[in-house]
Structures are given as C-alpha cells and as structure tokens.
Image (tube, helix red, strand yellow):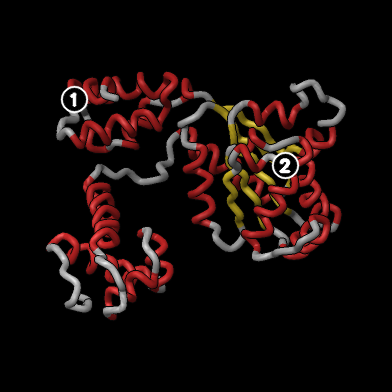
Amino acid sequence: MVEYDKKYTMTERQEWAWNKFWQLSEEKKYSLNQTAKIVGVTASTISGIRNGTYNANPSDQLNKLVAYFEIKESAAKQAKYDSYVPTSISSQVYEIINNCHLLGGLAVACGDAGIGKTQAALKYERDHTSNCIYIYVPPCMKSSNSIIKAIGKKLGVRKRAIDDLWTAISEKLTDGMIIVLDEAQHLSYEAIETLRSFSDVFNNSGKTLGICLIGNEVTVESTTGKSGHEIEFGQIVSRRKSLEVFKTSQIMRHDIELLFPELEGNKPEIDFLHNVAIGVQGIRGVVDIMIKAKANDNITYAGLVAAAKSK
C-alpha cells in the first residue's frame, strides 16, 4: 500500500485504485508524469494527495482512477486471442513484407478489411524492431509533408523546413531497412512518390530500402494508374516489386481452427464461423463473435449464432 495524507478520506474502492496507480507506475517503470497522463489526472494532483497539499476534496480525481482501473479490470476478464495468428492470408502478407525488406523497392499487399493485414504488419515490426518502421496512415495524413514528418518522428529527426527534413531522414535511414505504411489507400500520389524517392536514393547507391504499402483495393489504384493517371504512375509501377490483392473469400476453414483451437472437433461451430469469415466480416468479425460468446460463457453453435446477432 502506498501512503497518502490521512487528512483525505478514501473509500475502499478509491484506495484500491490509488494502489493500482502506483503498481502500474512500478511495473511499467513509468515516471509519475507518465502514469498520471495515462490514467487521466495530473501529476501535481497525485503528489498533492500523497503529500497533503491538494487544496480541495480529491474525491472526483480519485474516482477518475477508479473508473480507469475498473475498465482495465473488466477488459482483462474478456477473452483474449493472440494479436497475430499465421492464417493463410496473414502469413502471405508477412512474407510479402519480408520479401520487400530483403529486396528493397516498393511492394503492395491489399484487400478486404478484417483479413489480418494489419496484424501481420505489426507482427513484422515486433520481429524486426531495429530495422522496420511501421506507420499507421489516417485520412488526415495523406500528404507527402505529413508522411515525411511521421517518418522523421519515428527516427527522432526534426527539421522545420520539409526539404531539410527529407535530407535528414535519408541520411538517418540505413541499408536494409523497411518502412511499412498501413491504411496506405489514404496516401496521395505525391506521398507515394516521396516514399519512392527514399527507396531510389538507396537503390542508386547499391543499397536497399523497402517500402511496403498495406491497405484496401484503392491502394492498387494508387500504384497502377487505374485512377486515370497511367503516365504519372509509370515511375511507381516500374519500381514495384510485387502486388497482391486478398479477399475474405480466400479465408480457409483451417484458419478458423488456428484462431480458435478450443473449437477443435466442433464441426458446426467451425463451419458457422468460416461462413461468417468469408463474408464481409472477415477474421475480425469472427473474433468479435467469439469474444461475445465467451463473455456469455457459451461457445456452442447456438451461442455463436446468438453472439453474431447481438449488437
């Protein structure tokens, strides 16, 4: 138990959350500022409660701790599945990233949502922490300037002028690295050209830098010229090492068995989830169904159907 000034009165639940706060700080080796920011209070508030200098009733602030740790406690009780399972599609996406890493140049792995592309990319980043940069591309980050800034942040490079930042990044990147951009359908033509330019610098000096784009089928249009700009996209197409498009219809029954070994031998349940997966929901959809069914303590066929129908 971590002491606090006894002029403040805590409920049993507040005291539980107070101790969980310090446990989190110790386990993760976070500073007071880092831990306070995570749970949604200020470091000065925590220090004040501990030292007796907080000049108000701390109940509202302590209840923020209670709310945070109760949510985390509930989440921990939910069914968990490995973030990456080598399904037929995710393993192929992983291999595409790996080949791009080895050969350099531009590669594209795209297709339907919820089929394991992102998990494969994150798994690759975890497996190659020293020479893989993973960047999630939200819709607001479609410009070349935004992408350059994102790469610079990953590399710890900051320059005010964008041309200086490009030069600093190209000097910071090293031979044999790869940059993986997830949700790459949001990237503009100029952003893709900028990414290609980094790869070209390495290629021209006999080195390799891989650029792998992960996204939906719009990503294909951005690298093939199908959007009506065939001449403009010629440079990109000529440097693309591979392009693969994946569909939920390619998800195999064996993938369901890999994802949910607890269903081994349960043909109706596996068949049901496979039929869901090859539709619009994909792998992501069947994982959601299983989590709901486990929360209801019923992973029978009837339980899965009920979970699928629930909102």
- Residue 171 at what x, y percent from top left? 77, 64
The label on residue 143 is 2
Residue 130: quadrant of the picture: bottom right
**Residue type at tag 2:** Ser
Q: Quarter of the image for the N terminus: give it.
A: bottom left
- Residue 36 at what x, y percent from top left? 38, 65
* Camera-side mark, 2 or 1: 2
In-image side of 71 versus 232 (left or right): left
Q: Residues within 10 Å of mark 1 (few under 14, many from 20)?
A: some
Q: Residues within 10 Å of mark 2 (few under 14, many from 20)?
A: some
Residue labelled with disc 1: 303
Q: Secondary structure at mark 2?
A: loop
- Residue pictured at 46% horizontal, 31% vertical: 114
Spatial separation of the CA atoms under disc 2 and disc 1: 46 Å
Q: Secondary structure at mark 1?
A: helix
- Residue pictured at 59% horizontal, 40% vertical: 138
- Residue 118 at what x, y percent from top left? 51, 41
In-image side of 82 versus 168 (left or right): left
Q: In this view of the protein, which residue sits in the foreground, 31 or 231? A: 31
Q: Is residue 103 visible?
A: no
**Residues tagged 2 and 1 counted as in contact (Cβ below 8 A):** no
